[in-house]
Amino acid sequence: MTSPPRRPTDKLTVEEFCDDLRISSSTFYDWRKKGTAPRCIRIPNGALRIRRSDYENWLTDCEDHA
């Protein structure tokens, strides 16, 4: 059974975020420590989620306009 398509309002796990950017989770946590990662939500079990809209806005902010 396949999962339903994601909606733009869905939240990403750290693993999904890292897979999408092809980075390691240690890179993500390093960016968080430096304050350069996208905004995250900490859910009650301690896991982090990233709103897809925050991720898209963060990517736009990362664009190089050289």
Image (cartoon, helix red, strand yellow):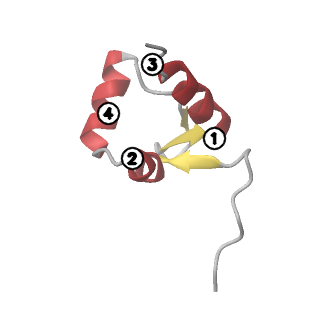
Q: Judge depth for marks 2 and 3 and give the one in front.
A: 3
User: Earlier along the polypeptide chain: callout 4 or callout 1?
Assistant: 4
How far is mark 1 from mark 3, CA to CA? Answer: 21 Å
Residue type at tag 4: Tyr
Checking the image for residue 52, the label placed there is 1
Specify few, some or many for label 4: CA neighbours under 10 Å numbering under 14, 14-19, or 20 or more: some
Checking the image for residue 4, the label placed there is none
User: Earlier along the polypeptide chain: callout 1 or callout 2?
Assistant: 2
Q: In the image, is 30 to the left or to the right of 17?
A: left
User: Earlier along the polypeptide chain: callout 4 or callout 3?
Assistant: 4
User: Earlier along the polypeptide chain: callout 4 or callout 2?
Assistant: 2
Location of mark 4 (residue): 29
Could you tell me residue 39's position as x and y percent? 54, 26
User: Earlier along the polypeptide chain: callout 1 or callout 3?
Assistant: 1
Of residue 62 and residue 34, the one placed in the foreground of this image is 62
How far is mark 4 from mark 1, CA to CA? Answer: 18 Å
Location of mark 2 (residue): 18
Could you tell me residue 4's position as x and y percent? 71, 70
Of residue 23 and residue 50, the one placed in the foreground of this image is 23
Specify few, some or many for label 3: CA neighbours under 10 Å numbering under 14, 14-19, or 20 or more: few
User: Is residue 66 visible from the viewing direction of this image?
Assistant: yes
- Image vertical order of residue 54 relative to residue 6, above or below: above
Of residue 45 and residue 3, the one placed in the foreground of this image is 3
Location of mark 3 (residue): 64
User: Earlier along the polypeptide chain: callout 2 or callout 3?
Assistant: 2
Residue type at tag 1: Arg
Q: Judge depth for marks 1 and 3 and give the one in front.
A: 3
SS for dot 3 = loop
